[in-house]
Image: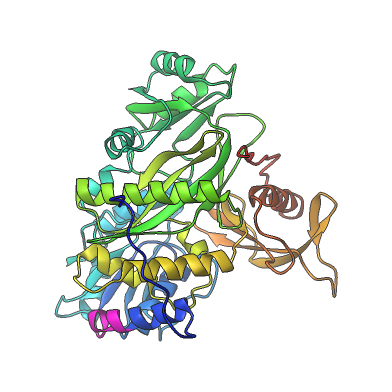
Amino acid sequence: MNQHKEMLEPPAQGSVPVHEEAREYYDALLRPLFEGRKFVLAGGLAASLGRRARALAALGAARPFLLAFGEGTGELPGPEDAHLHLFDIRPRDLVDQLLQEEATLRALPQNISAMIDRWDPDGSARVLCAPGDVPIVAGRETYAGRKPAWIALEDKTTIDAFWDAAGVQRAPSRIVAAEHRELVTAAAALDQGLGTVWVADVKSGLHGGAIGLRWVRPGEDGNAAADSLREIADRVRVMPFLEGIPVSMHGVVFEDAVAVFRPVEMVVLRPPEGDRLLYAGCSNWFDPGPEDRDAMRSTTRRVGHALRERVDYRGAFTMDGVLSRDGFVPTELNPRTGAGLSTLLAGLVDFPFGPLCWAVAEGERLAFRPALLERAVLDSADRHRVGGGSVTTRTTFDAGTFDLVHDGAEYREARENEAPNATLVVGHNPIGGYLSFSLDADRNQPGTPAAPEMCRALRFADHRLGTGFGPLTPARNVRP
């Protein structure tokens, strides 16, 4: 038997759906662990922290204290849900936002620490930290904190050594100094006809959402890319630009098994010129071929085992890559909860996935039944599709909702009594504005990539809201 393939539990006998069986099981399993306990939820937006607070409340936890960096879009937690303090920050982008959050949490203002002390006079509360890299907040230790060896794997200039040790096929690459001559020499050796991708180390902090990445196209001299990377990095990984659908794989590493879920499309859009790409969220609308799906899940399971064996990892993780002409090619590894999980869990209402992963990462020794979790998430994610994406912008606008219908190749606002094909929700974000686009699952057939629809939605936003995204094109599916 393959050492990286666990035997799944047989389906439960009877008529209880697997997601209900799993929810009831994990509620009962986790309640004694969280009941009555106090937590500080630190980092992120108030709306998302409110969802975490409600998940803890469902397990009997005490009313938490939230340290949020902006309101976000959606329902805000009320006084009955949590104590809430909002910090006012003005970040340049998502990475700058995370850096400002981390810096604030490491040196919390004295008056905020005093508020937490009054709420938690015996100091028994633990911290659930969104940035994940702050070990102590207001004198209280984190719960499910990240070890340095785990964080180190997010460096895109060192991860190739991990792929090689785990026996995972990857693209050729070179790690060079952030200097123009070395970068263009590496690029000339690696370009396969579509240019090369240059990605920064973590000198200036962890980065994602394509912010530390540059696509140097064929014929470009790379001067602008080299100059911008030199400001944030000492070393850069250079690899070929791969045509194909960007894909994110998710799993959970347990003590004795790895649960692995279905592929998630990363909606990465391409301007007609320049060296930047636009990351526009995640979608599980796209169906790779069955063989590709099986291969990606097998690779993800292998990577989960390697995480446990090499750095004693526990908890949720994300592996990103490209479903290229030659199959799936991984590009980065994030040993933490990834953005795509929200699409996978969309159909699991009131399911304690977050508390479950926190308990696993903390090292709690419980009967977690990894195969039950895997079956529940797979079943739900295959039946409940989320098509669309989300993006932040420097443009600000009033919160609102637009019902959209197809009008030829474009979207327009739905007229009265006209059933919409999709919905665009806009709101506020510390960076400026936030847009979330979703296809109506009853009026659209899943299976194809969501990125082309996101391009149309952003053209509508440019026309209606003046967002200024400009022309964008999606990645191409190059698999047979």
Please say whether residue 91 is visible from this viewpoint.
no
What residue span does the magenta drawing correspond to? Answer: 28-37
Residue 166 picture quarter: top left
Side of 347 where 7 appears, left or right: left
Q: Quadrant of residue 233?
A: top left
Q: Is residue 295 visible?
A: yes
Q: Is residue 403 magenta?
A: no
- Image quadrant of residue 83? bottom left
User: How many dots with numbers?
Assistant: 0
Q: Is residue 212 above or below residue 11?
A: above
Name the main secondary structure of what is drawn in magenta.
helix
**Image position, residue 18 (x, y; %):** 45, 77
- What residue sits 43% from the left and 82% below the top? 13
Residue that appears at 71% across and 39% down:
471
Q: Is residue 34 magenta?
A: yes
Position above or below: 377 against 32? above
